[in-house]
Image (cartoon, grey):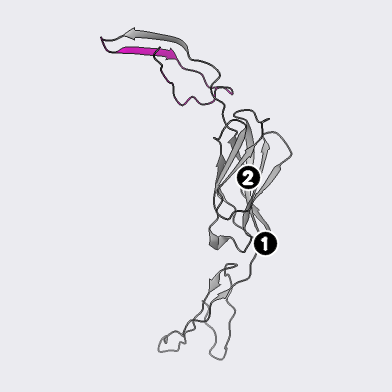
């Protein structure tokens, strides 16, 4: 902190965070050294302000068919800058010019799920998440791409064959299903005995 002239009895403290409680102490100094600090002042909370920190790690994906799941890292309390804090979620199909906007009023929220039967599986969306409080709307995150939920695979694996390996083992093989908009990411296969 800046040293204040010995004849001055007040100072303005700057660069404090909005809506945070502070307490202050004063120390006297001279050519010999620095004295003991005063007792702490009473707690004083700075005024609220529009939030300026956007959520981080905005992403999405997963969920069920006809869902768009958007996730983010919640903003810590010390950066919310006031009461009535929440999130503004904005998204649009890739290539569209119109944003859909949703408000999530929970301070602790880290996910929003948009459900609509017209969403096709694995459709790309541009998404961004912003913040607001009682003072107004704040910063939005940068745009990221998230995909709508997948559907179950509509194609069966082809070329299934079995080879006897021993008296107790059979090796089963098949051609993998190639990725496409209708199959999505195949996470595994199930081999059934008939």
The residue positioned farthest toward the left in the image shown: 167
Q: Earlier in the sequence, mark 1 or mark 2?
A: 2
| Above or below for 137 versus 12 | above
Membership of 194 in magenta stretch: no
Q: Is residue 109 left or right of residue 173?
A: right
Q: Provide the residue designation for mark 2.
A: 128
The crowd level at tag 1 (other Cα within 10 Å; few <14, some 14-19, many 20+) is some
Specify the label residue 86 is tagged with: none
Give coordinates of residue 83: x percent, y percent. 62, 63
| Above or below for 168 versus 128 | above
**Label 2 element class:** strand
Identify the main secondary structure in magenta: loop
Q: Which residues are magenta?
A: 166-191
| Above or below for 132 versus 11 | above
Q: Nearer the viewer, mark 1 or mark 2?
A: 1
The crowd level at tag 2 (other Cα within 10 Å; few <14, some 14-19, many 20+) is many
The residue under the point 61% across, 37% down is 68
Q: Provide the residue designation for mark 1.
A: 134
Give coordinates of residue 178: x percent, y percent. 51, 19
Give coordinates of residue 150: x percent, y percent. 56, 29
**Label 1 element class:** loop
Question: Distance from label 1 to label 2 (Cα)?
Answer: 21 Å
| Above or below for 87 versus 121 | below
Give coordinates of residue 176: x percent, y percent. 46, 17
Membership of 168 in magenta stretch: yes
Location of residue 145 (image quadrant): top right
Q: Is residue 168 left or right of residue 15?
A: left
The residue under the point 64% across, 28% down is 120
């Amino acid at each position: 902190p800046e040293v204040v002239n010995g004849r001055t009895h007040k100072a303005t403290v700057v660069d404090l965070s909005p809506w945070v409680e502070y307490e202050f102490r004063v120390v006297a100094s001279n050519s010999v050294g620095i004295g003991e600090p005063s007792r702490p002042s009473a707690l004083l909370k700075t005024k609220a302000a529009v939030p300026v920190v956007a959520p981080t790690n905005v992403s999405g994906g997963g969920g069920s068919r006809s869902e768009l799941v958007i996730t983010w890292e919640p903003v810590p309390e010390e950066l919310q800058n006031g009461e009535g804090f929440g999130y503004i979620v904005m998204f649009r199909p890739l290539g569209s010019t119109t944003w859909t906007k949703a408000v999530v009023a929970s301070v602790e929220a880290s996910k929003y799920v948009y459900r609509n039967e017209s969403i096709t599986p694995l459709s790309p969306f541009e998404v961004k998440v912003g913040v607001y409080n009682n003072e107004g709307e704040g910063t939005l995150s940068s745009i990221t791409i998230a995909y709508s939920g997948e559907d179950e695979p509509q194609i069966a694996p082809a070329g299934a064959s079995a080879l006897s390996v021993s008296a107790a083992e059979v090796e089963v093989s098949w051609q993998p299903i190639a990725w496409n908009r209708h199959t999505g990411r195949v996470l595994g296969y199930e081999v059934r005995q008939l």
